Image (cartoon, rainbow, N blue to C red):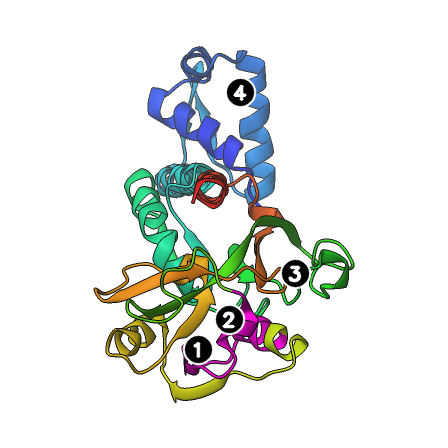
């Protein structure tokens, strides 16, 4: 492998036509420049310069090498620039995965800011409902822990997952969304047991962790939700509630953009809680875009 530094020195020799002038341009001694030229000739197995009078001139092979050296050095400069852009977060790809309610409530302004701050950075966003289920290896992943109790959560019981740093962003409760004329609509909060016998509208077509938490909490009280209708998502469930079909229960973060004619009340039960976790790939922790996204997620989780 030819040393690019020696190519740069040899190119300066050819451009200036002199060892001494090349040394002056580069800030080296003439002896050092001469040694680099000799070493390059050994590396290439070519005679690159020949003496003429008191100076030197490039051979035809030397002219060809100097010409190609210019192209090689330009490519290396482009490569160094690309590395600088990657280190500064100006280019490359950032992969994020999230569960649906965080995607709706938190990510749009954060992704918009990332797009403004890092316009050449490609952002890939995927939806997940369980930890570790995202396609590939996301750089950041928001997910809901399988248990409210961290010491019983298999996703965190052994510390940070391999290659990732893990932190809890917040613990939040569930709410019930019901028609404005419902018998419990005037209450400040609702006990989960009071919803036994109600007509429930399912709001999680994937039957993910968030649904399992509330179904498990109901089972602990001795009843199972009576699902009258299975809606594919929260928004659709709200529309059915607004039309008097039934009630729907979901995490607080998902209860945004409610339609007219419905009210939202918190569920008082401690068992109706979920923990929102953030996984960050350890090798990307100092990436500027990751640092910005992480800071914004912490802020919105603390203030929402």
Instruction: Say whether disc 4 or disc 2 marks the residue closer to the N-terminus.
Output: 4
Residue 209 in view in this figure: no
Q: Residue furthest left?
A: 260
Instruction: Say whether disc 4 or disc 3 marks the residue closer to the N-terminus.
Output: 4
Residue 195 lies in the magenta stretch: yes
Q: Secondary structure at mark 4?
A: helix
* 97 lies above or below 249: above
Q: Residue at x 48, y 38 (%)?
A: 295
Q: Foreground mark, 2 or 1?
A: 1
Of residues 162 and 101, which is closer to you in this image? 101
Cα separation between marks 3 and 1: 19 Å
* 249 lies above or below 240: above
In the picture, the disc for residue 129 is: 2
Instruction: Say whether disc 2 or disc 1 marks the residue closer to the N-terminus.
Output: 2
- Check if mark 2's residue and mark 1's residue have beta carbons within 8 Å: yes
Residue 152 in view in this figure: yes
In the rendering, at what x and y percent does residue 246 appear? Answer: 35, 80
Q: Secondary structure at mark 2?
A: loop
Q: Residue at x 45, y 86 (%)?
A: 227
Write down the region rendered in magenta.
191-216
Q: Image quarter for residue 245?
A: bottom left
List the residue tagged with mark 1: 204
Cα separation between marks 2 and 1: 10 Å
Horizontal side of 63 relative to 224 (left or right) equals left
Q: Image quarter for residue 303?
A: top left
- Check if mark 3's residue and mark 1's residue have beta carbons within 8 Å: no
Of residues 145 and 78, which is closer to you in this image? 145
Cα separation between marks 4 and 1: 71 Å
In the picture, the disc for residue 148 is: 3
Q: Residue at x 52, y 31 (%)?
A: 5
List the residue tagged with mark 4: 33
């Amino acid at each position: 492998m030819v040393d690019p530094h020696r190519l740069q020195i040899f190119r300066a020799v050819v451009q200036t036509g002199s060892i001494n002038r090349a040394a002056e341009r580069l800030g080296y001694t003439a002896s050092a420049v001469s040694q680099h030229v000799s070493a390059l000739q050994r590396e290439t197995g070519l005679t690159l310069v020949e003496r003429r009078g008191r100076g030197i001139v490039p051979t035809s092979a030397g002219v060809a090498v100097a010409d190609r050296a210019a192209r090689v050095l330009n490519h290396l400069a482009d490569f160094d620039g690309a590395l600088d852009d990657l280190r500064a977060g100006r280019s490359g790809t950032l992969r994020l995965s999230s569960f649906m309610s965080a995607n709706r409530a938190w990510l749009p302004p954060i992704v918009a800011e990332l797009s403004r701050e890092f316009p050449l950075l490609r952002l890939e966003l995927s939806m997940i409902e369980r930890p570790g289920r995202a396609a590939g290896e996301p750089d950041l992943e928001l997910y809901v822990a399988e248990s409210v109790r961290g010491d019983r959560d298999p996703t965190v019981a052994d510390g940070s997952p391999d290659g990732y740093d893990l932190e809890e962003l917040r613990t939040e409760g569930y709410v019930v969304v019901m028609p404005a004329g419902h018998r419990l609509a005037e209450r400040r909060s609702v006990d989960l047991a009071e919803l036994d016998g109600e007509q429930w509208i399912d709001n999680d077509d994937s039957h993910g962790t968030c649904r399992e938490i509330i179904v498990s909490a109901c089972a602990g009280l001795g009843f199972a939700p009576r699902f009258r209708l299975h809606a594919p998502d929260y928004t659709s469930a709200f529309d059915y509630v607004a039309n008097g079909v039934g009630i729907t229960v979901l995490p607080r973060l998902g209860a945004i953009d409610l339609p007219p004619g419905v009210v939202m009340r918190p569920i008082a039960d401690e068992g109706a809680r979920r923990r929102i976790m953030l996984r960050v790939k350890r090798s990307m922790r100092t990436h500027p875009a990751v640092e910005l996204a992480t800071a914004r997620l912490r802020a919105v989780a603390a203030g929402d």
